[in-house]
Structure formats: C-alpha cells, structure tokens
Amino acid sequence: MRRVRRKKFKIKFKVSPKVLIGLILSCVVLAACIYAAIRIHKSSVFRISEDNINCNIELARGIKHKIINKSLFTINIQQIRRQILKNNPEYKEVSFVKKFPASLEIYIEKREPIAQLSARDFFLLDKEGVVLKEGYGKPFTKFIAIEIDDLRSPFKKGDVIDDARLKDAFDLIARLKKGRILDDFEVKTINATNVQTLYFTIGNVKIVMGEGEWGRKIYVLAKLLKDELKDNFGSVKYIDLRYKKVYVGYKR
C-alpha cells in the first residue's frame, strides 16, 4: 500500500518594521502612563491636608479622616457624599469642587424647616416631610403646629412622613403666605386630621377651610378680616368658609 504523504503547512508571520516600532512605542507609552499614575497617586503634592478642606458647615471628624491625606485624583467623593447624607438627614444635598493641586471645596445644602408636627412630641419637618429633629416635649417657636390626631407613631430624625394630609397642610401654609394672612396674623395650628373639616387657628379663633378652593377662601377671609371683622375679631369664636355663604360664630 502506498503511503499517503501529508503535506506540511508552514505559516509565516511577517511583521513590518513600522508595525513593530509602533507596538514597542505603544508599550513604552502605556508603561509611562502607568508609572505616572502611580507617582501621582503617591505624590504628596496632590494629597489633601486638613487646612485645604473648605466647607460651609463644620464637618464631623470621621468624615475629615476619610479626606485627609487622600489624593485629589483618587478620592471617592461619591462615597463621602453618601456618608455625609446618611449621618445627617437634615442635609439635602452635598456638592464637591476639586481645586488643584490639593484643595477640596464642599458645599452642604441644609433642609429648611417649614412646620412642626404635633404628635405627642413636636417634630420639625421640611417641605418633603423629613423629620429634622428628634421629638421635643415643647413646641418650637415660630413654626405652625400641624395636628393629625391619628398620626401618633414615634418618629426618628431622618424619617420621611408620607401622608397626603401632611402635604395638604404644607400647601395651606404656602397659600396663607401667598395670601399675606401670615403677615398680619399668627397661625398657631393646622388640624388636617380630616380634610373635609380641615381648619387652622388664629389665636383662639377656629377658621374652618374644608377641602379645595383654598385660594378663593383665603381671599374671602382676608377681605373679611380687613373690613367686617377689623374691630371685633376678638369676639369671634369661629369662621366657616366651607360654603359659598360665610358663617361667623361669636363668643357668648
């Protein structure tokens, strides 16, 4: 039997000198970049000192320790941002600006209290319903107390109270400001337990608003307080604005 000869294939790679030089140069550049990155990471020139941290609010020591001696190039500002917001729920936003060679500017936006919730204790709230301070036994001055009689759970700093009635109360506060009622009268409480009988108090006078048409009702109230009740508001017990006809009740 005849042997079948197997053909041998030889694969020849030919690399042109230009391609070879290009590959070598690429490796040299890559190595130089890696070396430069390591040198930058280790260089003290870009390391942030405590004196080079500028913030509009005093930072906690634990946060500062996460920044001091870190390189401006490699510092994880998103991780620091999350930590600040987690530790301080009264802060709304944190922004950073890197300034070379080794400075870090931090701006913290605080949540602004808009009212207080009266629920056994008193809790300062911002417009998103975030609890800004732990419960306090006495009411905070200069803030309207919102009463929702069946909202009695204990709340912690940072909790978000998601209740539609609370949002109604915030909306009413904004409308009272717009209608300039708060310029001339001190609103002490808003009771939003039932939106159909929602009311607020000026001194001992109960102003029943009910649900909807608050813009019209506040306009009617402002006119009533300015004209008809200007001189005898002290004798009023309640004003009911839920209907087209306004009902005024007087003290006996």
Image: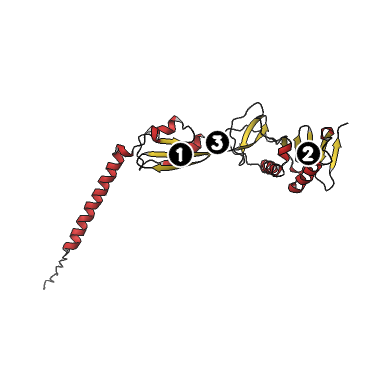
Mark number displayed over residue 106: 1
Secondary structure at badge 3 equals loop
Q: From this viewpoint, is residue 215 visible? A: yes
Residue sitting at x 42%, y 41%: 77
Lower position in the chain sequence, tag 1 or tag 2: 1
Residue that numbered label 2 is attached to: 207
Question: Residue 57 appears at what percent x and percent y?
Answer: 49, 34
Disc 3 to disc 1: CB gap under 8 Å = no
Q: From this viewpoint, is residue 191 visible? A: no
Lower position in the chain sequence, tag 2 or tag 3: 3
Quarter of the figure with residue 2: bottom left
Secondary structure at badge 2 equals strand
Residue sitting at x 19%, y 55%: 24
Using a 10 Å C-alpha cutoff, classify the residue at mark 2 as few (fewer than 14 neighbours), some (14 to 19) or many (20 or more): many
Lower position in the chain sequence, tag 3 or tag 1: 3
- For the C terminus, give its image quadrant: top right
Is 229 in front, or is 174? 229
Amino acid type at mark 1 = Ile
Gap in angstroms between the C-alphas marked 3 and 1: 16 Å
Question: Residue 183 appears at what percent x and percent y?
Answer: 71, 38
Mark number displayed over residue 90: 3
Q: Residue furthest right?
A: 252
Question: Residue 86 appears at what percent x and percent y?
Answer: 50, 37
Question: Residue 146 appears at what percent x and percent y?
Answer: 69, 36
Amino acid type at mark 2 = Ile
Disc 2 to disc 3: CB gap under 8 Å = no
Using a 10 Å C-alpha cutoff, classify the residue at mark 1 as few (fewer than 14 neighbours), some (14 to 19) or many (20 or more): some
Amino acid type at mark 3 = Glu
Quarter of the figure with residue 40: top left
Q: Residue furthest top?
A: 137
Residue sitting at x 40%, y 42%: 98
